[in-house]
Amino acid sequence: MDPFRDEALRLGIPQDEVERWLGTIVRPCASLGTGEPADGPVAGRLGGLPPMPEDEPVPNLPFLASVDLAAIPPGATDLPLPKEGTLLFFADTSDSAPYSDDRGWSRLVHVPAGRPVAERGPGGERPPKVYPGGDLHLVIDPSLPNRGDHIEGFPHNDELGDVWWETSCDMQTGGSVQIGGYPWVWNNDPVLDIDHGPGDWVLLAEIGSDAVEGDLGLVHWVIRRDDLAAGRFTQARAEYDMTG
């Protein structure tokens, strides 16, 4: 966070306010990418065929990514993630699929550790497209909302937000998959702007890659914090967003 601190202090913002602002707003997230830096541990895979349990049918949906929960260290996010198992993310973002009332356009599968799996597609006459595969390397990034309101108690809130925009590229790697943190919002915030029902809803994952259709399209998975802690991944909901 040194680039942010240095620029904020250069502008004359009091150091105690800078530190309080960071402590109040910044959240850690696990950023998983296929590019640089590639020296982080492999924590998942982008595209390819899903490693599905041998006794379960494969969803007839494009496979976006897998994430190995055991590879995400404590403190990488502020989420109560299970310590093991694999998450498989599926979504069809072509045409109008994400805008229908049918939630069948997406699927999240949790594979418990030690369960036998095999990389395979769903088969059938019209199987979904298989996207090129690649290892996802993990980096712990700071995360801030890309849009925000004035926060009480910070006289220099607007200036601090401007400094963040100016310096964030020096502090974030920006992978194809993000676990935890804040969502990148083009239109509706998937956590705050959509009524999912009561509970403490959080961002579980954000995926944006060549496998997601649309202009800078993103798929967000949100879940109640208590459901996540209990491993109730069937309670997660997917939301789609893109520019425009």
Image (cartoon, rainbow, N blue to C red):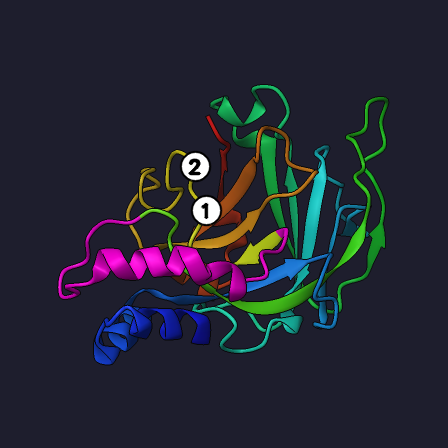
Q: Quadrant of residue 14?
A: bottom left
Residue 138 position, x and y percent, is: 65, 67
Note whether residue 53 is visible. no
Read off the residue under disc 2: 186
Expressed as whole percent of the image width and height from the top left, the position of residue 96 reads 56, 19
Vertically, is 169 above or below 240? below
Residue at horizontal 45 percent and vertical 71 percent from the top = 3
The percent position of residue 74, horizontal first and vertical second, equals 53, 78
Categorize mark 2 by other alpha carbons within 10 Å: few (<14), some (14-19), many (20+).
Answer: some
| Count of numbered tags | 2
Q: Is residue 165 magenta?
A: yes
Q: In front here: 232 or 70?
A: 70
Position of the N terminus by quadrant: bottom left
Left or right: 179 as drawn, with respect to 184: right
> Amino acid under label 1?
Trp
Q: Amino acid at mark 2?
A: Trp
The numbered dot on residue 184 is 1
**Whether label 1 touches label 2, CB < 8 Å:** yes
- Residue 123 appears in the rendering: yes
Of the pair 32 and 79, the residue shown nearer to us: 32
Which residue: 55% across, 39% down?
Answer: 218
